[in-house]
């Protein structure tokens, strides 16, 4: 006599999948743009070393972000605003491989390719 084993139909369970890194970063950018509407703008007076002086906080005019436009242009603005005119020049400077963070590399490479 043979035993017939019945297998229960396998149900596909929906498991949680983590969103991509770009989705998470975009969500954080939108969240910070919304925060510019909620958090009041202000600043401290600074001493000669650049440290804030206690009790000198005061409000400054607020410039809230345009949530959709600023969220979409933030990565572009952030990557281009951080460059100095020297970094965007067409001349290349030779730097040793140890000064770069990419791997593999030759013994010398162009600084323009690592920027």
Image (cartoon, rainbow, N blue to C red):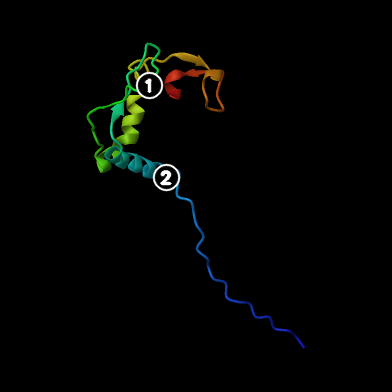
Q: Is residue 60 above or below residue 90?
A: below
Q: CA distance from mark 2 to mark 1?
A: 36 Å
Residue 32 position, x and y percent, is 34, 39
For the N terminus, the quadrant is bottom right
Residue 66 position, x and y percent, is 24, 39
Residue at image point 37% right, 21% down: 54
Residue with the most extreme front position? 55
For the C terminus, the quadrant is top left
How many numbered discs, if any? 2
Residue topped by disc 2: 24
Q: How many other residues sit within 10 Å of disc 2, few (<14), some (14-19) or many (≥20)?
A: few
Left or right of residue 47, residue 104 in this image: right
Q: Earlier in the sequence, mark 2 or mark 1?
A: 2
Q: Nearer the viewer, residue 2 or 63?
A: 63
Residue with the most extreme bottom position? 1
Q: Nearer the viewer, residue 57 or 6?
A: 57
Q: Nearer the viewer, residue 103 or 82?
A: 82
Residue with the most extreme right position? 1
Left or right of residue 104, residue 32 in this image: left
- Determine the image quadrant of residue 9: bottom right
Residue at image point 68% right, 80% down: 5
- Determine the image quadrant of residue 49: top left
Residue topped by disc 1: 54
Q: Which mark is residue 4?
A: none
Which one is closest to the eye, mark 2 or mark 1?
1
- Determine the image quadrant of residue 2: bottom right
């Amino acid at each position: 006599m043979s035993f017939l084993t019945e297998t229960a139909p396998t149900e596909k369970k929906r498991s949680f999948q983590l969103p991509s890194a770009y989705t998470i970063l975009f969500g954080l950018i939108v969240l910070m743009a919304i925060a510019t509407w909620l958090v009041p703008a202000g600043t401290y007076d600074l001493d000669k070393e650049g440290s804030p002086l206690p009790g000198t906080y005061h409000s400054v005019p607020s410039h809230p972000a345009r949530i959709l436009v600023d969220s979409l242009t933030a990565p572009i603005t952030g990557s281009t605003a951080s460059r100095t005119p020297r970094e965007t020049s067409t001349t290349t400077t030779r730097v040793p491989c140890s000064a770069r963070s990419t791997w593999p590399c030759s013994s010398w490479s162009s600084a323009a390719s690592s920027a």
